[in-house]
Image (cartoon, grey):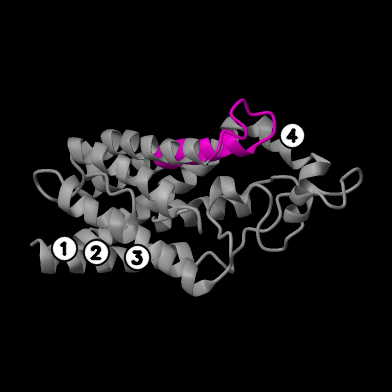
Amino acid sequence: MSSSDIFIGETIGTAILILLGGGVCAAVTLKASKARNAGWLAIAFGWGFAVMTAVYISGPLSGAHLNPAVTVALAIKDSDWSNVPTYFAGQLLGAMIGAALVWVTYYGQFQAHLTDHEIVGGPGAQATSAKAVEAQEKGAGPVLGVFSTGPEIRNVVQNLATEIIGTVVLILAVLTQGLNDKGNGLGILGGLITAFVVVSIGLSLGGPTGYAINPARDLGPRIVHALLPLPNKGGSDWAYAWIPVVGPLVGGAIAAGIYNVAFA
């Protein structure tokens, strides 16, 4: 694969991943969305199908890493770091594009949600409204969860461990079941297997932190949240932002080590 194929494939694939994954979060979260309050099951399956779609679209070009943790794990497995910067660049750019497309798709819903006093507080809001109180927090604004992850309980050790554990499961599944014949990315059957693994991680391990398990998936949309002209959007929670970046990278490295010792 050429550098241009890798960059284009990862940009397109990660954009599709975030468009569909962030899209289901927007659908479940935002006021005036037909899918509002559809719940965690919808989010878990939405992200799983997002992975599957993105893998099938980008696989022929780049091998469909779509995740810096996957890229790091494959670099460790193969002892080849030459294309890592290209993969990282495509993944981050694609994640930002995908997040911006979610905003375009749900533009009216974002406006309605973020101007509702019961959501963002202000005149007319109930003093005890949980949503209004949440919106007034300095760290995370009321729609940040559409773009990136955040913990239900802030505990650095637990939050970091949760992201590491979830990513180890994901990367071990990719390395043992998901690779194409060349071993440099996800294959056709591997894309389907990985999609269901992502659903399983979401249902079983996603509750504490929202299961980023992908640094680009969290960082790119968080940057977009900080840049978009969203009314009353609140903070982007940069104090937490390092955890869904470092945790998955550490998890990917650990999984690669386990694979090299136990399976290679």
**Residue furthest out toward the front:** 204
**Residue furthest out toward the top:** 34
- Residue 123 visible (yes or no): yes
- Mark toward the start of the polypeptide (4 vs 2): 4
Disc 3 secondary structure class: helix
Disc 2 secondary structure class: helix
Can residue 92 be found in the magenta stretch? no
Label 3, label 1: how far apart the Cα atoms are: 15 Å
Residue indicated by mark 1: 259
The circle drawn on residue 249 is 3
Q: Nearer the viewer, residue 78 or 189?
A: 189
Residue indicated by mark 4: 112
Q: Nearer the viewer, residue 132 or 146?
A: 132
Q: Nearer the viewer, residue 39 or 191?
A: 39
- Residue 105 at what x, y percent from top left? 57, 31
- Residue 32 at what x, y percent from top left? 69, 28
- Mark toward the start of the polypeptide (3 vs 1): 3
Disc 1 secondary structure class: helix
